[in-house]
Image (cartoon, rainbow, N blue to C red):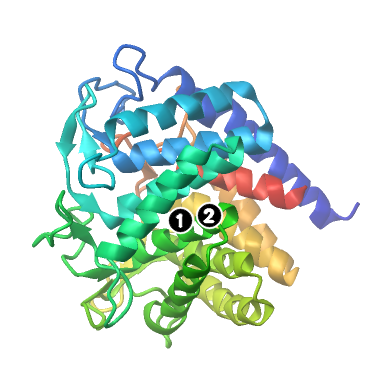
Amino acid sequence: MNMTDSASIRLASDLHHELTHHILPFWMERMQDWKHSGFYGRMDGRNKIHPRAIRGGILNARILWTFSAAARHLRQDPYLDVARRTREYIVTHFVDEKWGGTYWSVDYKGLPADTKKQVYSQAFFIYALSEYVMATGDTLSKEAAIRLFELIEQHSFDPVFHGYLEAFDRQWQPLSDMRLSDKDANEKKTMNTHLHILEAYTNLYRVWQDALLAKKLRSLIQLFMERIIDPDSSHLNLFFDEQWDCKSSVVSYGHDIECSWLLLEAAGVLGDHELAETVRQKCLQVVAAAEEGIRGDGSIVYESDRRTGLLDEDRHWWPQAEAVVGFYNAYELTRDTRYLDRAVACFRYIKGRLIDPGNGEWYWSIKANGTINRNDDKAGFWKCPYHNGRMCLEVMQRVK
């Protein structure tokens, strides 16, 4: 066994331990609401549960994906039990039986709180339900995922300029405020939504090899290659108007490195070797662009603005997780050990700084000054076991 094989095996072993001893137990033991069912909507940065917090669709979909994937790969019944319980909660409380699609959020009793149809969120339910199908073979979940795909194509797809519009009201009518969060620009098309539709359609294709789905997935890949990845910098542009004019100068290093492997994964499921090779070359360019955010301690900073020169050097949890996967993927593609070293160094940073060894899970971020950010949530609307859980599972499977 050579040194690079040993490094990969050690990394996979460390990630298996992190997943099974810190991440999954935290959500199973501390976040399940046994009184009202489902999961609590929030634990703050000081480990206090807020039992009456709003419960986000994205959080619940990501929990379903995580425990379905864990059950599928690790073959342990307790993870499957959580996946089944989460799927039941979603079907009972988040699915809009009248107008189709899923609600943005429900209250702690499971009643609709915000009924808008954010396409980003719809995509995550496709992603999660498809994973549940692979874990269980459940045909009803497959049918539910297909219905969501059809709704996105019916209401969100832009037949003139292509791509997908951001958000609608409960009856799938246009909204004036389409923002995913307060920090986002109010534009009709975003990189973030397209990245997660791509991810969702990739997973759905694994359980449903439909010709239209294949066509749409191929079209999404082309949009990234031709519209979203900047031809000069190889960073992802983030916000666009309806005609794909770029409306942002911000660079998101975490999204860069996440896209570098999700885009290649999408090309791979289609089985088109010529397309996959073209995407491979582009993805390595995106990896090189993302490396601009790497610091000497192995971490990756949050974002920068090409227009103003401002740099946000906080180390948020999710870009670190995506960096481990993205750089390990680049190592697999090139066998360049520099990328393996980057993956290992980033997890070393995570292990030393972001993981909360006493309370489980990870902190939201480490501030630029090196202190722990306790003002943002440990678990909540956006903080979930998806990025870090997927990091563990991805590398574990690749090292096998």
Residue 188 at x, y = what percent?
Answer: 20, 70
Q: Please report contact status of discs 2 and 1: CB closer than 8 Å, yes or no.
A: yes
Circle 1 residues within 10 Å: few <14, some 14–19, many ≥20: many
Report the disc number at residue 200.
Answer: 1
In space, the residues marked 2 and 1 are separated at their CA atoms by 5 Å
Q: Visible in this render: residue 294?
A: no
Q: Amino acid at mark 2?
A: Asn
Q: Is residue 198 left or right of residue 45?
A: right
In this view, the residue farthest toward the top is 35
Q: Amino acid at mark 1?
A: Ala
Q: Visible in this render: residue 7?
A: yes
Residue 388 at x, y = what percent?
Answer: 51, 43
The secondary structure type at the circle numbered 1 is helix
In this view, the residue farthest toward the bottom is 232
Residue at position x 28%, y 36% from top? 94
For disc 2, the marked residue is: 203
| 99 versus 246 height, above or below | above
Q: Nearer the viewer, residue 250 or 370?
A: 250
